[in-house]
Amino acid sequence: MNSSTFCGVVGYKAPYGVVPGLHPSTMDWYRSDSAMARTVEDALLTHNVTAGQHALDPHSVPFGPVEVPERSVAGCRIVVSETLGNYVVDDAVRDNLATAASSLESRGAVIEHRNPDWTVEEIMAVSLAHYGHTLAPGMADVIEATDAEVSPYITQFINYTMAAAARMPLHETFARETRIREELGQLLSGATALLTPVTTKDTFPAEAPQVSVDSHGRHYWADLMAVPFNICNRHPALAVPTGVGPRGIPTGLQIVGNAYDQASVFRVGFALEDAGVGV
């Protein structure tokens, strides 16, 4: 999602199990896969080729292709959240999101501005502990077994997330993930989709240090607003461009649907594309 936004293209994160994968990585309940493409239609086409049940992935689900949905959003209730709680979002990102929401409203959508009861601090604590319990130990084992030379970023990621996991037992991450997911379900109740930024910033400096944590102990994922939808990854999320920021770098929004409701996010995506948003 983040990569597609910074590249100014469409990215789709399918719900867990819709796109099959290989074990053991598919055991990770944050895992989601799908497509990046130049257009919403191409992303949908690519997704339909890769999705489906596979014998080597018992977690894959028997969903058929996503049918090309109705492109009209007339009468659709769409929730817009500029900050997803307390994320601090650059003006250019918010302005481009507002333009996109206005284009949907002009096409008959009912726009409602609401925020989930989330905090960046809770999202980060839970997600980093999750990766410290799941991904980081495996990475450390591979590095040790192969004597691989890795970047400071990788070393810092492993140490930082495993420290987070030491502070939060796995059973506690389950309980806290549940509260985060319940909040999203309530936010989307009766709505077609949620619109929210993909990142807080309109650009990141190219000369930034190749580490994941700054001198204040802040992990850069705190600027990535796609992270909550790793936690809530039964919900489809489609990232589409919204224009550019003041430094000429693309901005984007993500369209998040109700659990496993893939057609709705593509419906909204087509409507934004037809309106010329991000072009």
Image: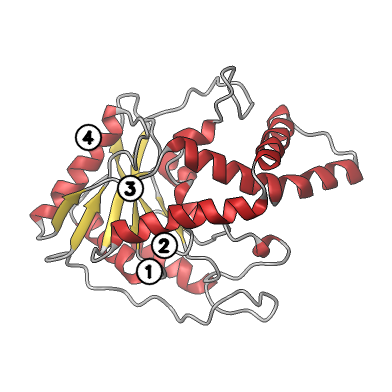
For label 4, count other residues whose C-alpha is less than 10 Å away and answer few (under 14), some (14-19) or many (20+): some
Q: Earlier in the sequence, mark 2 or mark 3?
A: 3
Mark number, residue 95 = 4
Using the image as rendered, state which of residue 74 and residue 161 is in the foreground: 161
Q: Quadrant of residue 197?
A: top left
Q: Horizontal and vertical percent for residue 76? A: 17, 64
Q: Earlier in the sequence, mark 3 or mark 4?
A: 4
Q: Earlier in the sequence, mark 1 or mark 3?
A: 3
Secondary element under disc 4, as helix, strand or loop, is helix
- Alpha carbon of mark 3 to alpha carbon of mark 4: how far? 20 Å
Residue drawn at x 36%, y 37% is 250
Q: Horizontal and vertical percent for residue 177? A: 51, 54
Q: Write down the residue under mark 3.
A: 116
Instruction: Indicate left or right for 181 with 112 as reference.
Output: right
Secondary element under disc 3, as helix, strand or loop, is loop
Mark number, residue 236 = 2
- Alpha carbon of mark 2 to alpha carbon of mark 3: how far? 17 Å
The reply to whether residue 217 is visible in this rendering is yes
Q: Write down the residue under mark 1.
A: 262
Q: Amino acid at mark 3?
A: Pro
For label 1, count other residues whose C-alpha is less than 10 Å away and answer few (under 14), some (14-19) or many (20+): many
- Alpha carbon of mark 4 to alpha carbon of mark 2: how far? 24 Å
Question: Which mark is in front, 1 or 3?
Answer: 3
Q: Horizontal and vertical percent for residue 59? A: 62, 74
- Alpha carbon of mark 1 to alpha carbon of mark 2: how far? 6 Å
Q: Which residue sits furthest top? A: 215
Residue drawn at x 60%, y 51% is 172
Secondary element under disc 1, as helix, strand or loop, is helix
Q: Amino acid at mark 1?
A: Gln
